[in-house]
Image (cartoon, rainbow, N blue to C red):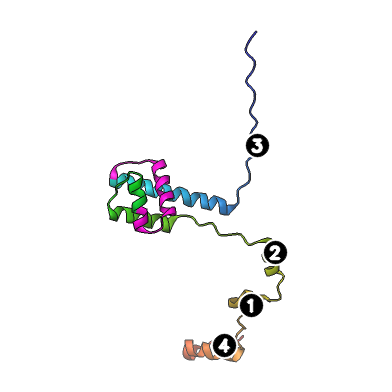
Amino acid sequence: RGAAPAPRLSRAPARPRSTMDALLGLQRLSLVQKICSELKNHIGVDDKTLAEFIIELAQENSTLPAFMRALDENGAEFPEDFASTLLHLVQTMAPRKRPAPSAPAASAAASSSSGPTERFSGLAIPNADPERLRKLEEEALGARAAVDP
């Protein structure tokens, strides 16, 4: 008799990702690619794993002396200006996930007594009165001011 057929592996349906999760993933990939590019330009190594490791070190050590110390402890003796460039790239390009508001806070904000005037103050500016509008048109257009039809 022949061998038993291989068991079929069922794949769980992929969890739908939110747009924000997808954006954070793209930002992370962009950062990894940029660090890879810098590594290739400066030391001739194009290694995604090394780039991700450097990103983790930079996120754990936010000051240049601490970052350089972490690099040295892990055998990467980079010049200070290169380490500074890498740290700056990580600090400026690393995706930051915004904390989601808690359910009670979100519902409280939606049902608060503050009206649209407080929530959308830029949109709550009153319309100009017709007399002021006419004066502004005369000022802008001079004698050719438009007359209301």
Q: CA distance from mark 3 to mark 1?
A: 46 Å
Q: Disc 2 marks which residue?
A: 104
Q: Nearer the viewer, residue 65 or 26?
A: 65
User: How far separated are the C-alphas under marks 1 and 4?
Assistant: 26 Å
Q: Residue at x 48, y 87 (%)?
A: 140
Q: Quadrant of the N terminus?
A: top right
Of label 3 and label 2, which has the lower sequence position? Answer: 3
User: In the rendering, which numbered label is found on residue 133?
Assistant: 4
Of the two numbered discs 4 and 3 on the same chain, state the one appearing first in sequence.
3
Res. 12 mark: 3
Residue at disc 3, secondary structure: loop
* Cα–Cα span, label 2 and label 1: 20 Å
- The Cα atoms of the two marked residues, 2 and 4, are separated by 45 Å
* Element type where label 2 sits in the image: helix
Q: CA distance from mark 4 to mark 3?
A: 63 Å
Q: What are the residue bounds of the magenta stretch?
A: 43-67
Name the mark nearer the viewer: 4 or 3: 3
Q: Amino acid at mark 2?
A: Pro
Q: Amino acid at mark 3?
A: Ala
Disc 4 element: helix
Question: In the rendered image, which quarter contains the C terminus?
Answer: bottom right
Left or right: residue 88 versus residue 2 is left
Spot occupied by residue 94 in the image (x, y as percentages of width and height): 45, 55
Q: Residues within 10 Å of mark 4 (few under 14, many from 20)?
A: few
Amino acid under disc 4: Leu
